[in-house]
Image: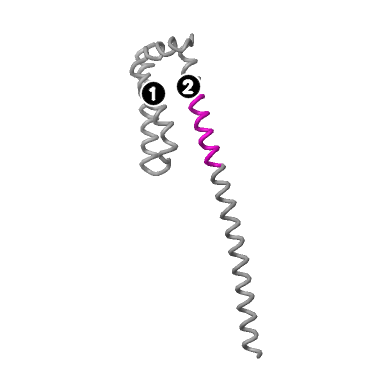
Amino acid sequence: MSVASYILGIVAALIVLGVVIESLRRHHLRERHAIWWLAAGVIALIIGVFPNLLGALAGLFGVTVPTNLVFFLSIAVLFLVSIQHSGELTELESETRTLAEAVALQDLRIKQLETSLAEALETRRNP
C-alpha cells in the first residue's frame, strides 16, 4: 500500500470519530447508539496506524483476503446496530400504543365530566 492509502485510512477514521463525538456533544446521538460507531472508528484507526495487523488478523481467522475480513466485520457491526434499533423501535411502538390508549381514556372521561357538568348547570337553572 502507498503512503497516501495509509494517510487516507487514518484521516477517514479520525473523521468518523470526530463526527460521532461531535454528534454526542450536540445531543444528536445518544451514547448507546454511538458505542458501535466509536468502536468501529477506533478499530479503523488502529488498522490505519498498524496496517499489518489486518493481515495478521485475517491469517488468524483463516481469511485469504484481508479486505474480506473488513467487509465481514462491517456487516456484523451493521447487523448488530440493526438489531438494536429494531428492539428500540418495538419498545417505542408499545409505549406509543399505551400512551394513545391513555389519551383516549382521558378524552372519554373529560367528555363525560363535561356532559355531567352541563347537565348539573342545566338542572340548576331550571329547577
Residue at the spot x=58%, y=64% of the render? Answer: 106
Q: Is residue 115 left or right of residue 56?
A: right
From the image, which quarter does the C terminus lie in? bottom right
Q: Which mark is residue 43?
A: 1
**Is 78 within the magenta?**
yes
For label 2, the residue is 73
> What's the residue type where badge 2 is placed?
Leu
From the image, which quarter does the N terminus lie in? top left
Magenta segment: 73-89
Residue 98 x, y percent position in the rendering: 58, 53
**Is 107 within the magenta?**
no
Residue 94 x, y percent position in the rendering: 57, 47
SS for callout 2: helix
Residue 47 x, y percent position in the rendering: 37, 19
Packing grade of label 2 (10 A; few <14, some 14-19, many >=20) is: few
Q: CA distance from mark 1 to mark 2?
A: 10 Å
Packing grade of label 1 (10 A; few <14, some 14-19, many >=20) is: few
